[in-house]
Image: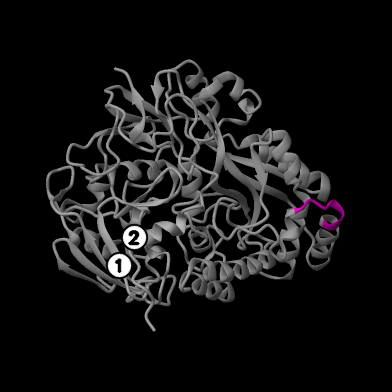
Amino acid sequence: MKRNRIALAGTALLAAGVMALAGCSAGGDAGNGGEETGASTGIVTVQSNEPQNPLLPAVTNEVGGGLVLQNIFAGLVYYEADGKVANELAESIESDDNQTWTIKIKKDQEFSDGTPLTAESFVKAWQYAAADPAYENQWWFSNFAGYNDGGDDPDNPAVVEDSLSLDVVDDTTFTVELAAPQSDFPTTLGYQVFAPLPESFFDDPDAFGQNPVGNGPYKLDKWEHDAVISLVPNDKYDGPRKPQNGGVDLVVYGTADAAYADLLSDNLDVINPGVPPSALATYKDDLGDRAVDQPAAIWEGLTIPARLAHFGNDEEGNLRRQAISYAIDRDQVTDVIFEGTRTPAVDYTSPVIAGWNDKIKGSEVTHADADKAKELWAQADAISPWSGTFTIAYNADGGHQPWVDAVSNQIKNTLGIDAAGQSFPDLATLRAEIKNRTLNAATRSGWQFDYPGAYNILGALFITGAGSNDGDYSNPKYDELVQKGATAPTVEEGNKYFEQAQEVLFQDLPVLPLWYRSTNAGYSTAVDNVEYGWDSWPIIYQITKAE
């Protein structure tokens, strides 16, 4: 029996209310919701990170590159400040059964180089992103009919071109067939992997990754590696995210403290969350009504890969993961180190995501219990004695050292073992070590939601072979439950399966939940109309700045 026709206007309701706590304005004239307030001509400077990868939708899945792609590409839909879904290039996204979708795009669209943007621009880009297991975002297409993950041999994955069931109907229409119904499919389409690509990309993908041509509100002007990425308004863009400034410089900082110091002296306009731990107690006094403190869809945890000695997917490894989790006093860290600007995590999603539940079976492991931790560690030692240092890797440019030191001390003092942080100079360097599986340590993990839905994190971080599954976790039962959640007829029914999937995660503990982040940020006296979205990123296009 077919369900009622579903169009994008209806799917926007899936996100409505989900982010009711997010998107609050902060100071100045913020809160215009992206409405035009009169364009300014100044260049806005925003704190950023050096991208880990070339600027390609198929491979970028970290904040440095993601912030660039979000602004140089326009997708079928985009997310407003409060997480609601709105059309960008799409005229309509419709289905009778949540499985076969017809997508119509606006007419007469162009890329920033003046070449035409058609339905084929989407189809070819998606086929490319789904073709190669080496692409970190390939997993996004796993529910498309025809998807091939590269075969059964993990050592020799195959590149499978044009596998997805996508058909171009005409210049402004294409169809998508999914392997199974997916009620939130239109909501996912604001993520960057679903961006269109111009023909120049297919001529030379390597060159394109260093100098991409997009269709978004901005276009790339220059990329000085490890220094700055400069964006200028794209005069070919006619969508809802029209730039209200003369351009944006995304400035790479080695530490969050250095960025904050520049903000205080008006040498930097906007910090990308968050405020360094050293300033959390004072930043609201420092910045006054330019300080931002609002909930955000950001989850943080501690990944303990099963490849580490004594932490395999076996009884000993499970006991040690539980012991480490019980040894961490999340309340103490969030109160003392983060000055109450973090909330201890009790699940694998976020309180601002629909379906969040603070009483999932097994979540008691997130509550500190020193006696329980010692007991479990002793049980593991009876299986195989521990020796060495429990190491937590982190990137120094993200302000993580204080909490890593605090957690290391908690583990050391509770379990009576050596524990310490391992610093990497920047996020790109740390991510390279993680990607190459050359890191012999636990590592800080974070997830800034790409769209407002639980499947986003439960699929990306924990499904077998997913691009952001840094610990190589694999459990068929978990995969099955997440797939059932993703293909459920409604979001509400899907969330029930997602909760069951989280129960499996709490049994296996591939990653220890730590805390939920808020958007703790701020801006200089030189800019107005500054707003941070549901995902914590500054909404760059609406910022105004005098020459």
Q: Residues within 10 Å of mark 1 (few under 14, many from 20)?
A: many
The quadrant in which residue 67 appears is: top left
| Amino acid marked by disc 2 | Leu
Q: Where does label 2 land, which residue?
A: 8
**Residue 533 x/y as whole percent:** 45, 41
Q: Amino acid at mark 1?
A: Glu
Report the side of 515 relative to 538 (left or right): right
Q: Which mark is residue 124?
A: none
Secondary element under disc 1, as helix, strand or loop, is strand
In the image, 116 versus 329, the foreground residue is: 116
Q: Which residues are magenta?
A: 367-372
| Residue appearing at x 28%, y 34% in the figure | 243
What's the distance in space between the residues labelled 2 and 1, CA to CA?
A: 7 Å
Image x and y of residue 107, in percent: 15, 54
Outermost residue on the bottom side: it is: 1
Instruction: Please name the residue that numbered disc 1 is placed on.
Output: 94
Residue lying at 12% horizontally and 49% vertically, measured from the top left: 115
Is residue 32 shown in magenta?
no
**Dot 2 crowding, Cα within 10 Å, few <14, some 14–19, many 20+:** many
Position of residue 455 in the picture relative to residue 326 (left or right): left
- Quadrant containing the N terminus is bottom left
Query: Which of 37 and 192 lies nearest the eye of the viewer?
Result: 37
Looking at the image, do the residues carrying marks 2 and 1 touch, with CB atoms under 8 Å apart? yes
